[in-house]
Amino acid sequence: MRMRRIPYEFVSKMSHDLKTPVGNAMMYTELMVDDIKNLLEEYPDLEDKLNPLIQYCNNIHLSSSKLINSIQSWGYSYQIEDGSFEIRAEDVDMKKLLLKVIASNEIFISGKSLDINLVYECRQTDCRSDPELLTLIFDNLLMLFINMARNGDEIRITVKDDDDGMMIRFFAAKASFTEILTDMFQSGISITDHLIPEQGILKPSGYGLLFASLALDFLNARFGVDEEGEEPRSYWLRLSLS
């Protein structure tokens, strides 16, 4: 029990402590953008010099929000395993949510000249779930696939009807399908299984997949990876519409 309690307490405290300074950085970039826009109104001839500063601030804000998501994901991971996480279910527009997640990764997508192709073919757009948890699941998955992709690769996301649910597939780069990563994306994963016994800390590799697996299990969703030999392979998950 002590092995499990130490990281939970650590992550809980560090999550709170880290979110405050990162949140402050996000707030100040917003204030800087407002000040720069005011300067532009007063000195329109400085547009070429000031517009890049707005872009820098927006990128800092976006990168900070990614860090917040990572911190929140680990806090929720331990809450889910500890049994203290409380779901906040509401109707979620899945198409809008996925487009928002893609947009939130734009600087990383454009930095590698990736093509993110969302094919939405599900008749219904809404499902009943926790929007924050779903956002973190998709953000962690997409970020992993972006990191594993080569410059110019395509990441295709499809959403299709599946009886009374929706099937969502991520067709990612070949490097995303290593045995270590695919083994991480399955039901029954536990944080405790991924501790280094001597240190009581998480083993490296696939943190986003570990969180996604824990969260999808909590939502009673089916998920997995296409069998080796299927082309193209995908990471898939099925969400109930009700």
Image (cartoon, grey):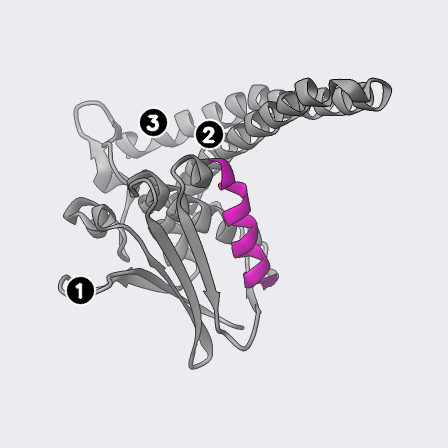
Decide which of 165, 130 is in the foreground and name it. 165
Q: CA distance from mark 1 to mark 3?
A: 37 Å
Q: Secondary structure at mark 2?
A: helix
**120 over 55 or under it: above or below:** below
- Taking the spot 30% from the left edge, 53% from the top edge, the residue there is 172
**95 over 69 or under it: above or below:** below
Few, some or many residues within 10 Å of mark 1 (<14, 14–19, 20+): few
Q: Are marks 1 and 3 in contact (CB under 8 Å)?
A: no
Q: CA distance from mark 2 to mark 3?
A: 10 Å
Apparent side of residue 143 relative to residue 29 in the rendered image (left or right): left
Circle nearer the N terminus (2, 3): 3
Q: Nearer the viewer, mark 1 or mark 3?
A: 1
Residue beneath label 3, please?
6
User: Residue 127, located in which quarter of the rendered image?
Assistant: bottom right
Circle nearer the N terminus (2, 1): 2
Residue range in magenta is 92-107
Q: Residue 152 at what x, y percent from top left?
A: 34, 44
Decide which of 138, 111 is in the foreground and name it. 111
Q: Secondary structure at mark 1?
A: loop
**165 over 17 or under it: above or below:** below
- Taking the spot 25% from the left edge, 27% from the top edge, the residue there is 200
Residue type at numbered disc 3: Ile
Q: Quadrant of the N terminus?
A: top left
Q: CA distance from mark 2 to mark 1?
A: 36 Å
Q: Secondary structure at mark 3?
A: helix
Residue type at numbered disc 1: Glu
Residue beneath label 1, please?
227
Residue beneath label 2, please?
12
Question: In the image as oriented, which residue stretches furthest toward the front?
Answer: 45
- Our reading of the magenta stretch's main secondary structure is helix
Few, some or many residues within 10 Å of mark 2 (<14, 14–19, 20+): some
